[in-house]
Amino acid sequence: MGKSVILLVKEIYYPVLAVFSFPANLLTIVILSRGNCGLSKCMSVYMMAMATADLLVIIINVMVYYIFSYHIPLSVLSYTPVCRTIIYMTMGTLDCSVWFTVSFTFDRCVVICCQKFKTKYCTKRAATTVVATVPILVLLKGIPVLFAYEPQQIINKLQWGCRSSVAFLSSSPGIAYVWFHSAWVVWLPFTLIVIFNTFTVRRILVANRVRTGLRGQRSEDHSDSKMENRRKSIILLFTISISFMLLWLTNAITLVTTRLSNTIYYQGNHKNPAYIATETGAFLKLLSCFQNPCIYAATQSKFREELKNVVKFPWRLMVGLGKMRV
């Protein structure tokens, strides 16, 4: 029998995603590190953290886990201890990506809604502290994952491959951890993002009414740079938040209903609706790692200018070297 459709899609989808997402996130990190995008320092820290986490997701989750481990099944990556470590890292990178997005949303909420708290929290030092703390909490939270997978087979006393441990997933601690994991990585972030954005929207509506009243009979053509900057910031915030929630929604539902969080080593019917739903959720949530560079380019004019400069830099360098030789 030939391969199922979902396996064929995986073999095409993940390499294509890696080809586009890896350079996109790498360029984003380079552009943000230059500091010429007109962003506040704390905002730059969070956006750099999100881009770095997304880049690690592409490297570890997509390239190592879904491409190399899948196409080279008898490599060192298939040793059970290595395999468990890879799965542990895949969950860690995804968790960091999620919680950096939540942290960014909270930071923007504080900037707009809490002027007194803003001076203390919305600083580069505070943002750096948050970005450094999140990975530590994520690594501690993921320790039970190391016990949730068992060897797929044993050859010459060597443990090969990983598959979900039925004993662990069926036990009370296993069930509790699956629910905790789904709440930690999806439902709690969803709830917090909705709450923060609700406060932000309400504050913006009130501020707009006040500013409109103060402006009175001024000309409609009069430019308000503060309002324009706020508008761009809000568009960026809402676009990132809404797209994140949409792309993670399928994974959130399947994670709770099937308890199959990593299915590359799943042994069973690949035409099973539960397996197909889980893989579809994985497709969409990993696509979220490509969304942020696209959103930055679509909503931030200075980011687009910097992107053009970075892309043109190798050509300018070669032209400069050519002139020097002449």
Image (tube, rainbow, N blue to C red):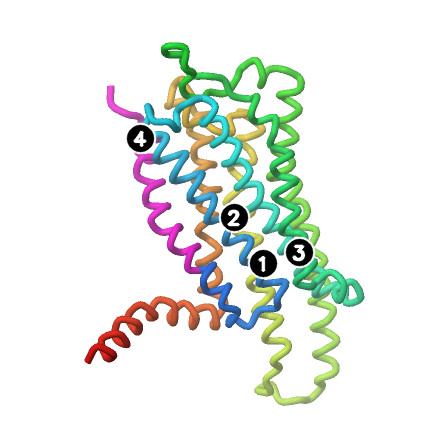
Prevailing secondary structure class for the magenta stretch in the rendered image: helix
Residue type, mark 3 in image: Asn
Residue type, mark 1 in image: Phe
Secondary structure beneath dot 1 equals helix
- Give the position of the C terminus as an image quadrant: bottom left
In the rendered view, tell whether residue 217 sits above or below residue 185: below
Give residue 249's position: percent from left, percent from top: 54, 40
Residue type, mark 2 in image: Ala
Query: Label 4 belongs to which residue?
Result: 71
Dot label at residue 299: none
> Which badge, 4 or 1, is on the more N-terminal residue?
4
| Mark pair 2, 1: CA separation | 20 Å
> Which badge, 3 or 2, is on the more N-terminal residue?
2
Give residue 189's position: percent from left, percent from top: 64, 44
- Number of marks in the image? 4
In the rendered view, tell whether residue 313 sits above or below residue 269: below
Question: Is the Cβ of the residue at disc 3 closer than 8 Å to that at disc 1?
Answer: yes
> Which badge, 2 or 1, is on the more N-terminal residue?
2
Dot label at residue 238: 1
Dot label at residue 197: 3
193 or 163: nearer the eye?
Answer: 163
Give me the residue at 59% from left, 75% from top: 228
Give residue 107's position: percent from left, percent from top: 67, 58
